[in-house]
Each structure stands twice: as structure tokens, then as C-alpha cells.
Amino acid sequence: MENSLDIKKMHEKPPYAMIAILFIGAFVALLNNTLLNVALPTIMDEFAVSPATVQWLTTGYMLINGILIPASAFFIQKFTNRSLFIAAMTFFTLGTLLAMLAPAFGVLVAARMIQAVGSAMMMPLLMNVMLTAFPIERRGSAMGLFGLVMITAPAIGPTLSGWVIEHYSWRTLFGIVLPFAILTLIYAVVKLRNITPNRDMKLDVFSLVLSSIGFGGLLYGFSSAGDKGWDAPIVYGTIIIGAIALTWFIVHQLRMSDPMLDFKIYKHPMFALASAISIVLSVSMFSGMILTPLYVQTIRGISPFHSGLLMLPGAIVMGLMSPITGRLFDKYGARILAIIGLTITVISTFYLSRLGLHTGYYYLMAIYTVRMFGISMVMMPIMTNGLNQLPMISNPHGTAMNSTLQQVSGAIGSAILLTIMTKRMESSGAELFAEAKQSGTAPTSAEGLAQLKEQIETQAMLDGINFSFFLSTLVAVVALILTLFVKRVMPPKNDGEYCGTQEQK
């Protein structure tokens, strides 16, 4: 391997300076993921486009990620980490510059998709480098630092975006990101070395097509359900097509001797269990990220900036806890951390299911922060424990699979929770209005009816949010039950050997 480092020497002295370059690139890319959400109404007004059209700035970005992340296992094995990172940062930087200068909405959408081409490679590449650079007994600490990037960057986005939009143009959002992207790219060209093993592979185009249709169809279908409704042909049509293509893709991969994405890694029981827990927990976690701002802004009438500010302490706690959790994982393993973390998550999510019309801002901030503290003790330890069971040659497939599942489960979980909230809201609203008519307290004047309707809608939405949080509590309980079966993975003796498990101490 050209310019590669000796694995044993690297384990003795990991290349921290080089990893820092990857961290900065991944942080900037992940920050960009959520930076634009608060700015969508402003962009909609400037370019005179509809809400459904402006949503393509996030939908298009997400679809490119959904298409490229499953293929990242191939790219990581085929190309050196240096060339892949430089290519990814180049795409991301060019997309950022084009977005900042975009003269028309179509150009802005294209720029976001170019950004996504770069960012899609960042997380699987960084995770794979971390797994290669550190010995298994120190991976917890390393992956804790990785979690610091993965968790903090997207969480800071809405708060930073809200402040910028209140004071400056939405183009400033890209102007903030651009210098960091350029400096990271220049530093990578000068300093970045190759440390991951590569092998000569050929891309199976049919696999790439099936993967793109499968994951892309599911992501688009579920993400569009909240806006267009489940009965829209574009929603159920893309979900059905995506499901068929994905099934075909999995069968095709299992039959291949050198698959693009190796589903045989699920023969390792702890990796399979880690995937199941991550999927279930992602669904529960996304409920807080979606329903909390919805409650704060719609029910309480608090501004988007202060809504983001409410969620910021939770992000900071998760960021601070991630390296600590990593060290605890190295010492005690994943199960005890996950059991404690999920117990906290279940209790705090239950408290969020009992919100009132006048629940205090700081009380809500405290509950949300405690919930994020609980989740911080689960995500990275469980994921790292599963990846530890894979031989090194399978690491690219494991990281690609984890990143893909987070994308898909996040989209599916969000769509289902929003649908449940809407249905509950409709039924609760109908019941409240019927009760008002039956009791004879319903006003007869137009103004009185309008006020009653507004009160009922607010109460109905609160019922919908609380019910969704309650179901999210039950989902977290499922994750807690699954965690009881987690066992600590023994370090592999060599690259190709199957890693057994030992009872968790």
C-alpha cells in the first residue's frame, strides 16, 4: 500500500494530526446538514418558491447521501483515504461556494447536491480510519471523540442558523462554512497520508443502480409522507419501488463473491444486535429532535432561535459526554453503559409525554438535556461494540451499513411519528369539538367559534405531541430490552478471524 503506515507502529502512536484534519472536515460537513433548516422560509420568500419546492434543498441533499453512503464501502476499499478525502472536500467546497453565490433557486439545489457528494463520504471514511488507526482496546476512547463530531455539529446547526438569519442574509451561512472547508482542503493536500488498506475492485454498476433506487426511494417516500400524505401516489409509489429494489439489492449482494455492500457481516451476532438497537434508538431519538421544537414553536409560540437555544445544552452535554463514555466503554464495555443510558432515556421521554400548555421553558430544557445525556451513553458504545466484532477487512462494510441505517431509520421514524401525531391530533380535535357542542358551551358568534377552534387545535396538537412521545417511550423500552442481550466482544487475534464474545462484566 503506497505511503501507508505500519499497523503495529500506528497502533503504538496513532496519527492524531492527520485524524484532526478528518475531524474538522467531518464537523464542517455535518454542521452544514442542519444549518439550512431554519433558513428555508427566508429562501422561499427570496426566490418566490412554494414550501414543497424549497424542501428540495434538504430532500436533494438527503437523497444524494442515501445513494452514495451505501457505496462508500466500495470507495473506501478501492481508493486511498487521502485521495478520497481530498475529492470529498473538493466537492463540498465547490458546492458551498456555488451555494453562497447562487443566482437562482435551481442553482442552489444543484449546489446542495454537490455538497452532499462530498459530505456522504466523510462519516464512513472517518469511522473507518479510526477503526484502522487505534487498537481494539482503545477504540472506545477514539470513537468517543468521533461521537463528539457526529453529535455536536448537527445540534449546533439550528441555533447558529437562527442567530445568523435574525441578523444577516442566509448566504452568510455558507460564507461561515467556506473558509473552514478551504483551509481543511489545503491542509489535507499538504499533510494527509494513507493509512487504510486498499485492494483492486470493480464497481458493479447494477448494484449501484439497485442501491440508489432502493435507498433513495425509501428515503424520499418516507420523508415526503408528512408533507404530501401517505395516500399520495408519489409517496407510496416510491416506497414500494424502493422496497422492491432494496430486496433485489440484498439478494444480489448475498450472491456476489465481492459485494458492493456485504450483508454477510450480519452473521456476527453482536454487530446484528448493535444495528437493531441503533435503529430502534434512532427512531426514539428523532422524536425529541422533531417534536420538541414543534411543541416550543407551535404550542408555546417561542421563536426558532430560542427553540434551537433550548436544545443546545443537550447537544453540549452529548458532546462533552462522548469522550468520557468512550473511556468508560474501554473499561467496562457497552452493556452497563447502555442499560443506564436507556433507563434515563425511557424516564425522560416519559416526562416529555406529559407536557402541558404552559410547561416551563427551563423545565423543558432540563428534561431534554437529561434525555440527551442518556442517549449519549448508548449510541457510540453500542455501535463500537458491534464494529469490534468485525474483522478489519469488513470495517468499510460495517461503517457504511451503520451510516446507511441511521439515514433510513431517521427518515422512517420521523415520518411515522409525525403521522401518528397528525392522526391523534385529528381524532382529539374532533372529540373536543363534539364535547363542546354536547355540553352547550360552544359559542354561537363567528368570533367566538374562531377562538374555540384555535383553542381546540392547540389542545389537539398538544395531545398529538404527547401521544407520540409516549409511543417513543415504548420504543426506547424495546431498545432497553435488546440491550440486556449485549455481550462484550473479544479482540480479534488476526484480521480474518471471527471474533467471539465473552460475558459482559
Image (spheres, rainbow, N blue to C red):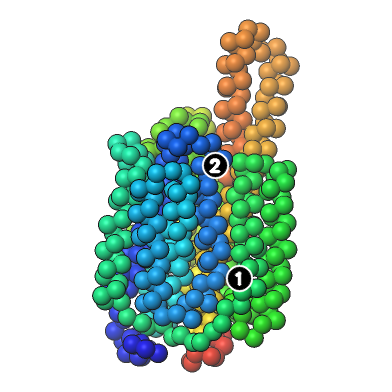
Q: Looking at the figure, which quarter contains the N terminus?
A: bottom left
Mark 2 lies on a secondary structure that is: helix
- x, y percent for residue 280: 59, 59
Residue at coordinates 34% horizontally, 54% vertically from top-left?
97
Residue at coordinates 46% horizontally, 85% vertically from top-left?
198
In the displayed image of the protein, which residue is found farthest to the top?
A: 445
* Residue 346 appears anywhere in the view: no
Of pointers 1 and 2, the one earlier in the residue sequence: 2
Front-lying residue, 48 or 293: 48
Residue at coordinates 29% horizontally, 84% vertically from top-left?
13
Which quadrant would residue 283 be assigned to in this image? bottom right
* Residue 447 appears anywhere in the view: yes
Check residue 53 in the rendering and tell me which mark sits there, or answer none: 2
| 456 lies above or below 48 | above
Which quadrant would residue 202 be assigned to in this image? bottom right
Check residue 358 in the rendering and tell me which mark sits there, or answer none: none
Looking at the image, residue 107 sits to the left or right of residue 473; the answer is left
Front-lying residue, 408 or 283: 408
- x, y percent for residue 40: 45, 41
Looking at the image, residue 76 sits to the left or right of residue 222; the answer is left
- x, y percent for residue 445: 63, 7
Q: Number of labelled discs?
A: 2
Q: What amino acid type should be assigned to the residue bearing mark 1?
A: Leu
Mark 1 lies on a secondary structure that is: helix
- The crowding category of the residue bearing disc 2, from other C-alpha atoms within 10 Å (few below 14, some 14 to 19, many at least 20), is few
Q: What amino acid type should be assigned to the residue bearing mark 2?
A: Thr
Q: CA distance from mark 1 to mark 2?
A: 27 Å
Q: Which residue is disc 1 drawn over?
A: 208
Q: Are marks 1 and 2 in contact (CB under 8 Å)?
A: no
Residue at coordinates 70% horizontally, 27% vertically from top-left?
430
- x, y percent for residue 366: 40, 44
